[in-house]
Image (cartoon, grey):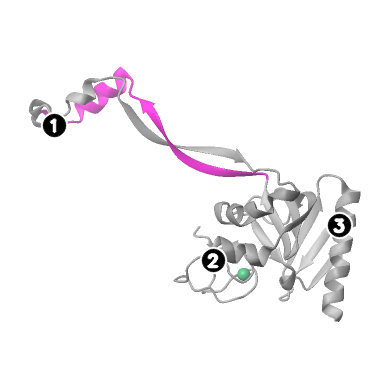
Amino acid sequence: MALVLCQQCLSWVEPIAEQCPQCDYPIDLRAADPTLEDLAATIGPLTSVIGPVRISRTVLPYRGVLYATTGGLFFLPESVERVRLVPTVLSPGSLVRALTRIPMRILRLGTLRGAWNFERPHMRVEVFVQPSPRLGPGDGDQIPRLLMDDPGAFFFARRSIKSVRRTFSGWALVRPNNLTLRLKPLGDRAAFNEQMTALASEVLETVLR
Ligand SMILES: [Zn+2]
């Protein structure tokens, strides 16, 4: 799966026919990523922590924390999977197996002298889970970098919210193309609902203005 950051809706998406499947905006794969300064200008300062949430999607992580900024909503997954290269030490058995596959001509040339050292490190790829930071009021300047570093993170700009609706299990954010993202609060429901109610009335005011 090749993900790109849609510069219109600031979600990591897999383009379909050079269009963003979230907001239908054309995606130019040759365009450079936005700079951290561009992102900071769009996202704006962090205003509050809305709370832990589960969102309606299956391909990317769906549990995380929702934050409010002056520009919209930022979702950060609770953790991110990363890969790293770690050294591994050849056991004597694996070294013997490796050497039996090396032509004698090369062994006689002595080019593999170093391989006789059993402690010689080799590298292998390891996948590990890194917990995401929990942002506080003064940490808003980290958001652009977190968005670029974690394809599970996304920003939902206020300009991309057509409506905010209360649902049976939580909330629904509706885009102008009617694509809906469902949110289910996982922590303090009353605090979460209070903030989403405030957002819903602000969005309604903007639409009516
Ligand atoms: Zn988009």
Please name which of the two marks, 1 or 2, marks the residue nearer to the observer: 2
Q: Determine the image quadrant of residue 145.
A: bottom right
In three-dimensional space, the C-alpha distance between marks 2 and 3, rounded to whole angstroms, equals 29 Å
The answer to whether residue 166 shows anywhere in this view is: no
Q: Secondary structure at mark 2?
A: loop
Mark 2 Cα shell of 10 Å, populated few (<14), some (14-19), many (≥20): some
Bounds of the magenta segment: 78-104
Looking at the image, the residue that sits furthest to the bottom is: 209
Q: Which mark is residue 195?
A: 3
The answer to whether residue 207 shows anywhere in this view is: yes
Instruction: Give the amino acid type for the residue marked by disc 1 in the picture.
Output: Pro
Among the two numbered marks 2 and 3 on one chain, the one whose residue lies closer to the N terminus: 2
Q: Nearer the viewer, residue 103 or 209?
A: 209
Q: Would residue 26 be found to the left or right of residue 122 on screen?
A: right
The number of discs equals 3
Contact between labelled residues 3 and 1, with CB atoms less than 8 Å apart: no
| Residue 28 image position (x, y, % from top left) | 49, 74
Instruction: Give the amino acid type for the residue marked by disc 3 in the picture.
Output: Gln
Q: Mark 2 highlights which residue?
A: 34
Among the two numbered marks 1 and 2 on one chain, the one whose residue lies closer to the N terminus: 2
